[in-house]
Image (cartoon, rainbow, N blue to C red):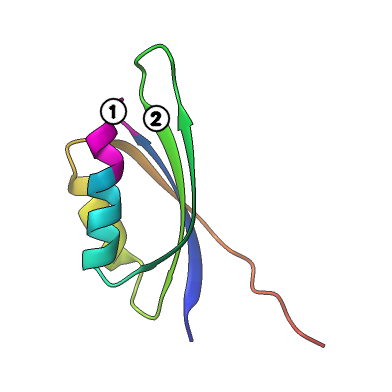
Amino acid sequence: MMTPHTLTIRTRNDAVAVERLLQVTRYRGFQLVGMQLHGQADQQGMVIELQVQSERPLSLLTGQLAKLYDVLQLDVHEVQAQLRA
């Protein structure tokens, strides 16, 4: 069963940062379900929200993302499973 996860990532204000995040996500075997990008006009960086899913442990992805030069902060948000009646 594929488990959905939401990651909020603050990066340096560099266009290639988004490309690197997506590359690592794909290489680690995670499927991108959604993405929102919030840029800052004052060079403080970007906030990127990724929704990913995979059968693999999330730590395989977060460990690699945290090592990227462009990543300044990485937060994982728990996704509540919805029950069907």
1 and 2 marks in contact (CB < 8 Å)? yes
In the rendered structure, which disc, 1 or 2, sits on the residue that comes first in sequence? 1
Horizontal side of residue 60 vs 45, given as left or right = left
Residue at 58 percent of width and 63 percent of height: 79
Residue at 28 percent of width and 32 percent of height: 15
Does the segment drawn in magenta span residue 14? yes
Horizontal side of residue 48 vs 21, given as left or right = right
Does the segment drawn in magenta span residue 58? no
Q: Residues within 10 Å of mark 1 (few under 14, many from 20)?
A: some
Marks 1/2: CA distance?
6 Å
Residue at 44 percent of width and 34 percent of height: 47
Q: Which residue lies furthest to the right in this view?
A: 85
Q: How crowded is mark 2: few (under 14 residues within 10 Å), some or many (20 or more)?
A: many
Query: Where residue 6 sits in the image (x, y, percent)?
Result: 50, 56
Dot 2 amino acid type: Met
- The reply to whether residue 28 is visible in this rendering is yes
Query: Where residue 55 sits in the image (x, y, percent)?
Result: 39, 81
Residue at 82 percent of width and 88 percent of height: 85
- Residues in magenta? 11-18
Tag 1 residue:
12
Tag 2 residue:
46
Q: Which residue lies furthest to the top in this view?
A: 42
Query: Where residue 60 sits in the image (x, y, percent)?
Result: 26, 67
Q: Tag on residue 56?
A: none
User: For numbered disc 2, what is the local secondary structure?
Assistant: strand
